[in-house]
Amino acid sequence: MSKNPDDPLYPDDQIPEPQHNGRGALSNASSRFDDERKIRTNDGWDIEDELPPLRTTLTRDATRTILARNTSPDIPFDRSINPYRGCEHGCIYCFARPTHAYLGLSPGLDFETKILFKPEAAKLLVAELASPKYRPDVVAMGTNTDPYQPVERDLKVTRSILQVLSDFNNPVGIVTKNHMVTRDIDILADMAKRNLAEIFLSVTTLDKDLARTMEPRASAPHRRIDAIKRLADAGVPVGVMTAPMIPGLNDHEMEAILEAAAAAGATRAGFTVLRLPLEIKELFEEWLRANRPDRAERVLSLVRQMRGGALYQAEFGTRMKGEGPIAQLIAARFSAANKRLGLNKIRYRLDTMRFAVPESARTALVDAKRDARQMKLF
Protein backbone atom coordinates (compact mmCIF):
# COMPACT_ATOMS: atom_id res chain seq x y z
CA MET A 1 0.00 0.00 0.00
CA SER A 2 1.30 3.46 -0.89
CA LYS A 3 2.56 5.69 1.89
CA ASN A 4 2.31 8.85 -0.17
CA PRO A 5 1.49 11.71 2.24
CA ASP A 6 -1.24 12.84 -0.18
CA ASP A 7 -2.97 9.47 0.14
CA PRO A 8 -6.07 9.95 2.37
CA LEU A 9 -5.45 6.49 3.87
CA TYR A 10 -2.38 7.97 5.56
CA PRO A 11 -3.54 11.17 7.27
CA ASP A 12 -1.23 13.99 8.38
CA ASP A 13 -1.72 13.10 12.04
CA GLN A 14 -0.56 9.50 11.63
CA ILE A 15 2.00 8.62 14.31
CA PRO A 16 4.20 5.55 14.72
CA GLU A 17 3.54 2.74 17.17
CA PRO A 18 5.21 3.57 20.49
CA GLN A 19 8.18 1.36 21.30
CA HIS A 20 7.38 -1.32 23.87
CA ASN A 21 10.12 -2.61 26.12
CA GLY A 22 10.82 -6.29 25.77
CA ARG A 23 9.19 -6.62 22.35
CA GLY A 24 10.90 -7.14 19.01
CA ALA A 25 8.60 -5.55 16.42
CA LEU A 26 8.23 -1.78 16.36
CA SER A 27 4.86 -1.74 14.59
CA ASN A 28 1.62 -3.67 14.31
CA ALA A 29 0.40 -3.30 10.73
CA SER A 30 -2.86 -5.03 9.82
CA SER A 31 -3.00 -8.48 8.30
CA ARG A 32 -2.34 -8.45 4.55
CA PHE A 33 -5.73 -10.14 4.14
CA ASP A 34 -7.68 -7.40 5.92
CA ASP A 35 -9.94 -5.09 3.90
CA GLU A 36 -9.27 -2.32 6.40
CA ARG A 37 -6.03 -0.89 7.75
CA LYS A 38 -5.40 0.18 11.34
CA ILE A 39 -3.63 3.54 11.58
CA ARG A 40 -2.46 5.16 14.82
CA THR A 41 -3.20 8.90 14.88
CA ASN A 42 -2.74 11.81 17.24
CA ASP A 43 -5.84 12.59 19.29
CA GLY A 44 -4.73 16.17 19.91
CA TRP A 45 -3.74 15.67 23.53
CA ASP A 46 -0.04 16.31 24.07
CA ILE A 47 0.14 14.16 27.19
CA GLU A 48 3.07 11.78 27.37
CA ASP A 49 2.04 9.09 29.80
CA GLU A 50 4.29 6.10 30.38
CA LEU A 51 2.87 3.17 28.46
CA PRO A 52 1.70 0.16 30.44
CA PRO A 53 3.47 -3.10 29.55
CA LEU A 54 2.18 -4.75 26.40
CA ARG A 55 1.00 -7.99 27.93
CA THR A 56 0.76 -11.40 26.32
CA THR A 57 -2.74 -12.79 25.83
CA LEU A 58 -3.50 -16.49 25.38
CA THR A 59 -6.25 -18.04 23.27
CA ARG A 60 -7.18 -21.71 23.09
CA ASP A 61 -6.52 -23.20 19.66
CA ALA A 62 -9.39 -25.54 18.83
CA THR A 63 -7.47 -27.48 16.19
CA ARG A 64 -8.61 -31.08 15.69
CA THR A 65 -5.26 -32.36 14.39
CA ILE A 66 -1.77 -31.95 15.80
CA LEU A 67 0.67 -33.32 13.21
CA ALA A 68 1.49 -30.90 10.38
CA ARG A 69 2.84 -32.38 7.14
CA ASN A 70 5.18 -30.85 4.57
CA THR A 71 6.77 -31.85 1.27
CA SER A 72 9.41 -29.12 1.04
CA PRO A 73 12.71 -30.34 -0.45
CA ASP A 74 14.57 -27.84 1.77
CA ILE A 75 13.43 -29.48 5.00
CA PRO A 76 14.71 -32.88 6.21
CA PHE A 77 11.45 -34.00 7.84
CA ASP A 78 7.88 -34.56 6.72
CA ARG A 79 5.96 -34.01 9.96
CA SER A 80 6.06 -31.52 12.77
CA ILE A 81 4.18 -30.31 15.84
CA ASN A 82 3.75 -26.67 16.82
CA PRO A 83 2.25 -26.45 20.32
CA TYR A 84 1.84 -22.68 19.90
CA ARG A 85 0.90 -20.23 17.15
CA GLY A 86 2.74 -16.97 17.56
CA CYS A 87 5.90 -16.70 19.65
CA GLU A 88 6.60 -14.55 22.65
CA HIS A 89 10.35 -14.61 22.02
CA GLY A 90 9.74 -11.76 19.57
CA CYS A 91 12.69 -12.46 17.25
CA ILE A 92 12.44 -9.70 14.68
CA TYR A 93 13.65 -11.91 11.82
CA CYS A 94 11.30 -14.84 12.54
CA PHE A 95 10.11 -16.35 9.25
CA ALA A 96 6.91 -17.57 10.97
CA ARG A 97 5.58 -14.05 11.55
CA PRO A 98 3.52 -13.90 8.32
CA THR A 99 1.49 -16.93 9.44
CA HIS A 100 -0.34 -14.73 11.96
CA ALA A 101 -1.96 -12.94 9.02
CA TYR A 102 -4.00 -16.09 8.36
CA LEU A 103 -5.60 -15.51 11.77
CA GLY A 104 -6.51 -11.93 10.93
CA LEU A 105 -3.70 -10.71 13.19
CA SER A 106 -0.60 -8.64 12.57
CA PRO A 107 2.76 -10.30 11.93
CA GLY A 108 4.18 -7.44 13.99
CA LEU A 109 3.40 -7.01 17.68
CA ASP A 110 0.35 -9.30 17.50
CA PHE A 111 2.62 -12.23 16.59
CA GLU A 112 4.55 -11.93 19.83
CA THR A 113 1.72 -10.86 22.15
CA LYS A 114 -1.34 -12.82 20.95
CA ILE A 115 -0.45 -16.47 21.38
CA LEU A 116 -2.67 -19.44 20.53
CA PHE A 117 -1.99 -22.62 22.49
CA LYS A 118 -3.17 -26.18 21.99
CA PRO A 119 -4.35 -27.60 25.32
CA GLU A 120 -5.57 -30.84 23.72
CA ALA A 121 -2.24 -31.48 21.97
CA ALA A 122 -1.31 -34.63 23.90
CA LYS A 123 -4.77 -36.16 23.51
CA LEU A 124 -4.82 -35.41 19.77
CA LEU A 125 -1.34 -36.86 19.38
CA VAL A 126 -2.30 -40.12 21.07
CA ALA A 127 -5.19 -40.51 18.63
CA GLU A 128 -2.98 -39.82 15.59
CA LEU A 129 -0.13 -42.09 16.66
CA ALA A 130 -2.51 -44.90 17.61
CA SER A 131 -4.23 -44.82 14.23
CA PRO A 132 -3.55 -47.88 12.03
CA LYS A 133 -2.75 -45.44 9.22
CA TYR A 134 0.18 -43.87 11.07
CA ARG A 135 3.70 -44.70 9.89
CA PRO A 136 6.44 -43.81 12.41
CA ASP A 137 9.12 -41.25 11.65
CA VAL A 138 10.89 -38.37 13.39
CA VAL A 139 8.54 -35.64 14.63
CA ALA A 140 10.11 -32.18 14.44
CA MET A 141 9.36 -29.46 16.99
CA GLY A 142 10.44 -25.83 16.86
CA THR A 143 10.28 -25.66 13.09
CA ASN A 144 7.84 -22.74 13.07
CA THR A 145 7.43 -21.28 16.55
CA ASP A 146 9.47 -22.17 19.62
CA PRO A 147 8.03 -25.02 21.74
CA TYR A 148 9.81 -23.56 24.79
CA GLN A 149 8.65 -19.97 24.61
CA PRO A 150 7.93 -18.34 28.01
CA VAL A 151 4.26 -19.40 28.27
CA GLU A 152 5.36 -23.06 28.20
CA ARG A 153 6.65 -22.64 31.74
CA ASP A 154 3.06 -22.67 33.02
CA LEU A 155 1.12 -24.41 30.24
CA LYS A 156 3.49 -27.41 29.79
CA VAL A 157 1.98 -28.29 26.40
CA THR A 158 5.38 -29.25 24.99
CA ARG A 159 6.16 -31.45 27.96
CA SER A 160 2.87 -33.31 27.54
CA ILE A 161 3.70 -33.94 23.86
CA LEU A 162 7.15 -35.28 24.73
CA GLN A 163 5.64 -37.69 27.22
CA VAL A 164 3.33 -39.10 24.54
CA LEU A 165 6.17 -39.46 22.03
CA SER A 166 8.21 -41.26 24.68
CA ASP A 167 5.33 -43.61 25.51
CA PHE A 168 5.01 -44.54 21.81
CA ASN A 169 8.80 -44.75 21.25
CA ASN A 170 8.44 -42.19 18.47
CA PRO A 171 11.63 -40.15 17.84
CA VAL A 172 11.68 -36.36 18.14
CA GLY A 173 13.97 -33.57 16.97
CA ILE A 174 13.74 -30.17 18.66
CA VAL A 175 15.07 -26.69 17.81
CA THR A 176 14.77 -24.03 20.50
CA LYS A 177 16.25 -20.76 21.76
CA ASN A 178 15.22 -21.31 25.35
CA HIS A 179 17.13 -22.73 28.31
CA MET A 180 13.77 -24.11 29.47
CA VAL A 181 14.44 -27.22 27.38
CA THR A 182 16.62 -28.40 30.27
CA ARG A 183 13.48 -28.67 32.41
CA ASP A 184 12.55 -31.75 30.37
CA ILE A 185 15.93 -33.48 30.60
CA ASP A 186 14.27 -36.31 32.52
CA ILE A 187 12.14 -37.22 29.48
CA LEU A 188 14.75 -36.31 26.85
CA ALA A 189 17.59 -38.24 28.49
CA ASP A 190 15.39 -41.32 28.81
CA MET A 191 14.42 -41.02 25.14
CA ALA A 192 18.06 -40.49 24.16
CA LYS A 193 18.98 -43.82 25.77
CA ARG A 194 16.59 -45.39 23.25
CA ASN A 195 18.00 -43.25 20.40
CA LEU A 196 14.76 -41.28 20.19
CA ALA A 197 15.80 -37.65 20.75
CA GLU A 198 18.10 -34.98 19.34
CA ILE A 199 18.11 -31.27 20.30
CA PHE A 200 19.46 -28.18 18.55
CA LEU A 201 19.94 -24.86 20.33
CA SER A 202 19.63 -21.88 18.00
CA VAL A 203 22.37 -19.36 18.83
CA THR A 204 22.29 -16.26 16.65
CA THR A 205 24.78 -14.10 18.51
CA LEU A 206 26.99 -14.11 21.62
CA ASP A 207 26.45 -10.36 22.03
CA LYS A 208 23.92 -10.01 24.85
CA ASP A 209 23.03 -6.44 23.85
CA LEU A 210 22.25 -7.42 20.25
CA ALA A 211 20.31 -10.46 21.48
CA ARG A 212 18.29 -8.30 23.87
CA THR A 213 16.92 -6.16 21.04
CA MET A 214 16.84 -8.75 18.23
CA GLU A 215 15.44 -11.67 20.29
CA PRO A 216 14.05 -9.87 23.35
CA ARG A 217 12.38 -12.76 25.21
CA ALA A 218 14.57 -15.67 24.16
CA SER A 219 17.19 -16.94 26.60
CA ALA A 220 20.41 -14.94 26.74
CA PRO A 221 23.23 -16.36 24.61
CA HIS A 222 25.23 -17.71 27.56
CA ARG A 223 22.12 -19.50 28.81
CA ARG A 224 21.68 -21.26 25.48
CA ILE A 225 25.31 -22.41 25.59
CA ASP A 226 24.68 -23.65 29.13
CA ALA A 227 21.65 -25.59 27.87
CA ILE A 228 23.89 -27.31 25.32
CA LYS A 229 26.23 -28.35 28.12
CA ARG A 230 23.45 -29.61 30.38
CA LEU A 231 21.89 -31.67 27.60
CA ALA A 232 25.25 -33.10 26.51
CA ASP A 233 26.16 -33.98 30.09
CA ALA A 234 22.83 -35.83 30.37
CA GLY A 235 23.64 -37.90 27.28
CA VAL A 236 21.23 -36.13 24.93
CA PRO A 237 22.65 -35.64 21.40
CA VAL A 238 22.80 -31.88 20.95
CA GLY A 239 23.78 -29.49 18.19
CA VAL A 240 23.82 -25.78 17.45
CA MET A 241 22.06 -23.78 14.74
CA THR A 242 23.84 -20.55 13.82
CA ALA A 243 20.70 -19.16 12.33
CA PRO A 244 20.02 -16.84 10.80
CA MET A 245 23.35 -15.44 9.69
CA ILE A 246 22.83 -11.77 8.77
CA PRO A 247 25.73 -10.33 6.77
CA GLY A 248 27.10 -7.17 8.28
CA LEU A 249 25.28 -7.73 11.56
CA ASN A 250 26.11 -11.09 13.16
CA ASP A 251 27.85 -13.23 10.53
CA HIS A 252 31.29 -12.27 11.91
CA GLU A 253 30.36 -14.25 15.05
CA MET A 254 29.78 -17.58 13.30
CA GLU A 255 33.11 -19.17 14.25
CA ALA A 256 32.89 -17.93 17.85
CA ILE A 257 29.39 -19.38 18.23
CA LEU A 258 30.48 -22.74 16.84
CA GLU A 259 33.54 -22.79 19.12
CA ALA A 260 31.46 -22.03 22.22
CA ALA A 261 28.88 -24.67 21.32
CA ALA A 262 31.51 -27.33 20.58
CA ALA A 263 33.26 -26.61 23.88
CA ALA A 264 29.91 -27.08 25.65
CA GLY A 265 29.37 -30.50 24.06
CA ALA A 266 27.62 -29.89 20.74
CA THR A 267 28.51 -32.48 18.13
CA ARG A 268 26.45 -31.19 15.22
CA ALA A 269 25.85 -27.80 13.64
CA GLY A 270 23.78 -26.12 10.96
CA PHE A 271 23.14 -22.65 9.60
CA THR A 272 20.77 -20.63 7.47
CA VAL A 273 20.99 -17.09 6.16
CA LEU A 274 18.41 -14.40 6.80
CA ARG A 275 15.01 -14.96 5.17
CA LEU A 276 12.66 -12.01 4.71
CA PRO A 277 9.40 -13.23 3.16
CA LEU A 278 6.26 -11.07 2.99
CA GLU A 279 5.84 -8.66 5.93
CA ILE A 280 9.18 -9.52 7.53
CA LYS A 281 11.01 -7.32 5.02
CA GLU A 282 9.35 -4.16 6.37
CA LEU A 283 9.49 -5.28 10.01
CA PHE A 284 13.20 -6.13 9.84
CA GLU A 285 14.16 -2.95 7.99
CA GLU A 286 12.18 -0.86 10.48
CA TRP A 287 13.94 -2.59 13.39
CA LEU A 288 17.36 -2.31 11.75
CA ARG A 289 17.09 1.42 11.08
CA ALA A 290 15.92 2.04 14.65
CA ASN A 291 18.46 -0.17 16.44
CA ARG A 292 21.51 -0.22 14.13
CA PRO A 293 21.15 2.94 12.02
CA ASP A 294 24.89 3.16 11.40
CA ARG A 295 24.97 -0.12 9.50
CA ALA A 296 21.42 -0.45 8.16
CA GLU A 297 22.24 0.41 4.54
CA ARG A 298 25.23 -1.92 4.46
CA VAL A 299 23.28 -4.85 5.93
CA LEU A 300 20.43 -4.41 3.46
CA SER A 301 22.90 -4.13 0.58
CA LEU A 302 24.65 -7.37 1.60
CA VAL A 303 21.31 -9.16 1.95
CA ARG A 304 20.37 -8.07 -1.58
CA GLN A 305 23.70 -9.37 -2.83
CA MET A 306 22.71 -12.81 -1.50
CA ARG A 307 19.23 -12.59 -3.02
CA GLY A 308 19.78 -11.59 -6.64
CA GLY A 309 19.21 -7.91 -5.92
CA ALA A 310 16.01 -8.43 -3.88
CA LEU A 311 15.54 -8.79 -0.13
CA TYR A 312 14.14 -12.30 -0.50
CA GLN A 313 14.03 -15.27 -2.85
CA ALA A 314 11.38 -17.90 -2.25
CA GLU A 315 12.79 -20.59 -4.53
CA PHE A 316 13.63 -23.98 -3.06
CA GLY A 317 17.36 -24.58 -2.93
CA THR A 318 18.30 -20.91 -2.43
CA ARG A 319 15.90 -19.57 0.20
CA MET A 320 17.86 -21.14 3.11
CA LYS A 321 21.41 -20.51 1.89
CA GLY A 322 21.23 -17.61 -0.57
CA GLU A 323 23.44 -17.28 -3.62
CA GLY A 324 26.39 -15.26 -4.88
CA PRO A 325 29.81 -14.48 -3.33
CA ILE A 326 28.50 -13.37 0.10
CA ALA A 327 26.43 -16.52 0.59
CA GLN A 328 29.26 -18.71 -0.73
CA LEU A 329 31.72 -17.14 1.70
CA ILE A 330 29.42 -17.76 4.69
CA ALA A 331 28.97 -21.39 3.63
CA ALA A 332 32.73 -21.86 3.16
CA ARG A 333 33.48 -20.39 6.59
CA PHE A 334 30.87 -22.65 8.16
CA SER A 335 32.37 -25.71 6.51
CA ALA A 336 35.94 -24.80 7.54
CA ALA A 337 34.92 -24.16 11.16
CA ASN A 338 33.03 -27.45 11.34
CA LYS A 339 36.06 -29.34 10.06
CA ARG A 340 38.40 -27.62 12.51
CA LEU A 341 36.09 -28.22 15.47
CA GLY A 342 35.15 -31.78 14.55
CA LEU A 343 31.45 -30.99 14.22
CA ASN A 344 29.07 -33.04 12.06
CA LYS A 345 31.36 -36.07 12.06
CA ILE A 346 28.49 -38.03 13.60
CA ARG A 347 25.01 -38.07 12.12
CA TYR A 348 22.45 -39.45 14.52
CA ARG A 349 19.88 -41.65 12.88
CA LEU A 350 17.03 -41.71 15.31
CA ASP A 351 15.35 -45.09 15.69
CA THR A 352 11.90 -45.53 14.17
CA MET A 353 11.87 -49.30 14.61
CA ARG A 354 11.05 -49.13 18.33
CA PHE A 355 7.67 -47.53 17.69
CA ALA A 356 4.80 -49.33 19.41
CA VAL A 357 1.31 -48.31 20.44
CA PRO A 358 1.00 -48.75 24.22
CA GLU A 359 -1.91 -50.84 25.45
CA SER A 360 -3.45 -47.86 27.24
CA ALA A 361 -3.68 -45.99 23.91
CA ARG A 362 -5.24 -48.99 22.16
CA THR A 363 -7.88 -49.19 24.85
CA ALA A 364 -8.56 -45.46 24.68
CA LEU A 365 -8.93 -45.64 20.90
CA VAL A 366 -11.40 -48.51 21.13
CA ASP A 367 -13.39 -46.65 23.79
CA ALA A 368 -13.46 -43.48 21.69
CA LYS A 369 -14.78 -45.36 18.65
CA ARG A 370 -17.45 -47.03 20.77
CA ASP A 371 -18.54 -43.70 22.23
CA ALA A 372 -18.71 -42.18 18.74
CA ARG A 373 -20.96 -44.99 17.54
CA GLN A 374 -23.21 -44.61 20.58
CA MET A 375 -23.55 -40.86 20.00
CA LYS A 376 -24.92 -41.55 16.52
CA LEU A 377 -27.92 -43.24 18.17
CA PHE A 378 -29.11 -39.96 19.64
Image (spheres, grey):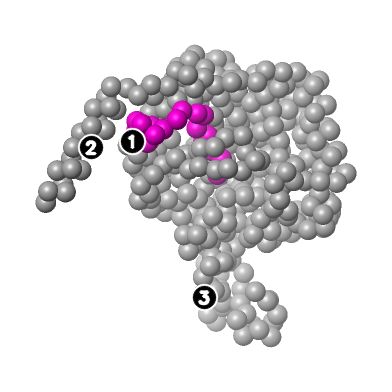
Q: Are marks 2 and 1 in contact (CB under 8 Å)?
A: yes
Question: Closer to the observer: label 1 or label 3?
Answer: 1
Which mark is drawn over residue 36? 3
Residue drawn at x 41%, y 32% is 134
Task: Name the element at disc 1.
Answer: helix
Q: Give the Cα separation between the discs numbered 2 and 1.
A: 9 Å
- Residue 132 on the magenta segment: yes
Which mark is drawn over residue 368? 2
Q: Amino acid at mark 1?
A: Ala
Depicted 225 relative to depicted 54: above or below: above
Q: Amino acid at mark 2?
A: Ala
Residue 265 position, x and y percent, is 65, 19
Q: Quadrant of residue 276?
A: bottom right
Q: Give the Cα separation between the discs numbered 3 and 2.
A: 44 Å
Residue drawn at x 80%, y 28% is 335
Quadrant in the picture for the N terminus: bottom right
Q: Is residue 45 visible?
A: no
Q: Earlier in the sequence, mark 2 or mark 1?
A: 1
Query: Which range of residues does the magenta coloring cover?
Result: 125-144
Q: Is residue 321 visible?
A: yes
Residue 27 position, x and y percent, is 60, 63
Q: Earlier in the sequence, mark 3 or mark 2?
A: 3
- Residue 320 on the magenta segment: no
Q: Are marks 3 and 2 in contact (CB under 8 Å)?
A: no
Depicted 175 relative to depicted 15: above or below: above
Residue 259 position, x and y percent, is 74, 24
Task: Name the element at disc 3.
Answer: loop
**Left or right: residue 19 compared with residue 68:** right
